Amino acid sequence: MRWKFLAIFVAAILFTASTMILVVLFLTSGRDPGIIPRNAHPPEPEDIGESSNLPDWPGGQHGSTGLPLTRDVLVNGISVKVKYCHTCMLYRPPRCSHCSICNNCVERFDHHCPWVGQCIGKRNYRFFFMFVSSTTILCLYVFAFSWVNLRRIMDMHECKIGRALLKSPISGLLILYTFIAVWFVGGLTSFHLYLISTNQTTYENFRYRYDRKTNPYNLGVGQNFIDVLFSRIPSSKNNFRAKVKEDSATFTSSLSMGRVLSPPKMSMDLEMGMKRQAVDAEDLEDLHSQIGSAMGLERCGTEPPHIVGRKGCSEISSDIEAFAEEFATERGFSERKKIERHTNDDS
């Protein structure tokens, strides 16, 4: 009877833990991590409190006074540089970074997690940590009670572990699986415990290395845990259900450009076609004149001075006649194809 109650207790805990893990996983992957909305136009120097005599930079718009690539911001009395994002056209807040996969600026950017398919930032970091830590605890729990089950089988049947594994192979598989998995999720949990205790992000730990300089966000171990895990989650700055507003000016300009550019293209094609036909006619007439002159020379037995010593009159006339026939044949074939295409279009 005691083992039955223990089995029910274990099953209840497993079900609760699995449900909790799934819930925090959905909250991690489906929640806005803290995306900062993009600007439709870059900020003006006057809007950011800069003087109007700033030097131009390559990202300046329409040759106007550009914006500096970085700005200095005070965080807890320490100067921190923030960068200008060319994609979102804004100055990133402190601890914000642009994710190259999501193509968004995310507040308190930690990393992009491929396992949940989402950025980990200010609004979903605690749920990510809960997912990783609860998965570690569940692995340890299953690992321990799988050994308890094997020990119970050994005591009940008075056998060794090999026979106990034959009687309960599921326990052996769970022991192997959780032993491998706990190294990954357990190591990740330990690393993020260190990050929380020092109030760092994964991006900051690999990029800035605060162990070599002062971390302006470190408030002490206790206050860091409160700030990261128990502080109020800010509301989202995006309305993902809102309809997309089209830029009417850009749309109108693109349409007007299309209307203006289309007729010249057609007229250019027509003009080129007419010129090509005129050139073909001129070439054909020139060939006919050359044939006539060559035949006349052949009759009189003389040669033009510019072809003396190259070929005889008969050879020249035969070559020119062959070339003229080929040229006329190709031109007649192309004209016939045009007439057939025009007839098919009319029908």
Image: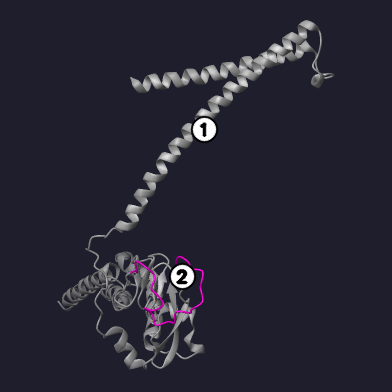
Residue bearing mark 1? 272
Asked whether the beta carbons under mark 2 and mark 1 sit within 8 Å of each other, the answer is no
Seen at 62% across and 22% down, the residue is 283
Point out which mark residue 64 bears: 2
- Horizontal side of 328 relative to 14 (left or right) equals right
Tell me if residue 223 comes above or below residue 235 in the rendering. below
Q: Which one is earlier in the sequence, the residue at label 2 or at label 1?
A: 2
Q: Quadrant of the N terminus?
A: bottom left
Q: Residue at x 51, y 21 (%)?
A: 334
Please name the residue shown 37% across and 20% down the image: 344
Q: Residue furthest left?
A: 1
Q: Is residue 188 above or below residue 86?
A: below
Q: Tell me if residue 180 can be seen.
A: no
Camera-side residue of 10 and 234: 234
Instruction: Residue at the far top: name it.
Output: 299
- Report, in whole angstroms, how far the alpha carbon at label 2 lies from the one at label 1: 41 Å
Quadrant in the rendering for residue 201 = bottom left
Q: Which residues are magenta?
A: 38-64
- Tag 1: amino acid: Met
Rendering coords of residue 170 (x, y %): 30, 65
Left or right, 34 with reference to 320: left
Closer-to-camera residue (102/238): 238
Q: How many marks?
A: 2
